[in-house]
Image (cartoon, rainbow, N blue to C red):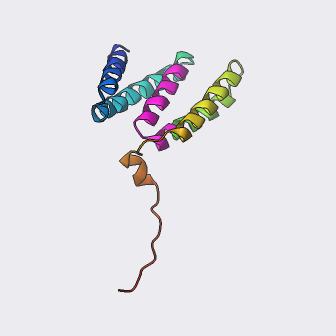
Amino acid sequence: MDRTQFIYWQIETLEHLGAMRRAYALEVEAANLHEQRSKRLLVTNDPNGWIDLFAAVTYWGKSGHHVHAHRLLSEAEQAATGLVDGRDNLTTEISRLQSWLRSLNVVPALSDLAVQSLPAMPRMAA
């Protein structure tokens, strides 16, 4: 957890300085760390795992990895349907994050573009 806190403050500083390319790499690292931690915690039914899951989605979204972020939210939505306590709060937060992701105006990550099909262009005679 100390590493994610350190990364958070580095990102804040870099964004303040306008060094967005440097912040991007750290956002990806933070997203991975939060996602890994959330999976470890949620397997043991530790509710703190949801906090890390939402942090991972936030970092994936900020870094342009929208496909991955939406996939995580879909998995979270499925997991939340099986809960009794806190389900309403979780589904509300999931919906809020889905809306937030759709509103982001960032350049998609190349890995996201690789899974999307490109438009077909008709061949034209020369």
Which segment did they paint magenta?
49-69
- Residue 82 in percent (x, y) is at 68, 28
Residue drawn at the location 42% of the way across and 48% of the way down: 112
Specify whether residue 66 is painted magenta. yes
> What is the total number of numbered labels drawn onto the structure image?
0
Q: Is residue 121 above or below residue 75?
A: below
Residue drawn at the location 40% of the way across and 45% of the way down: 107
Q: Quadrant of residue 73?
A: top right
Q: Quadrant of residue 26?
A: top left
- Residue 45 in percent (x, y) is at 57, 18
Residue drawn at the location 56% of the way across and 34% of the way down: 100
Near-viewer residue (6 or 107): 107
Specify whether residue 96 is painted magenta. no
Q: Would you say 18 lies left or right of 106 here? A: left
Q: Residue furthest top?
A: 2
Which image quadrant: the C terminus? bottom left
Q: Would you say 65 lies left or right of 26 here? A: right
What secondary structure is the stretch in magenta mostly built from? Answer: helix
Q: Would you say 62 lies left or right of 7 here? A: right
- Residue 119 in percent (x, y) is at 47, 65
- Residue 104 in percent (x, y) is at 50, 39
Near-viewer residue (46 or 6): 6
Q: Residue furthest bottom?
A: 125
Residue drawn at the location 67% of the way across and 22% of the way down: 89
Near-viewer residue (58 or 40): 58
Q: Is residue 123 above or below residue 42?
A: below
Which image quadrant: the N terminus? top left
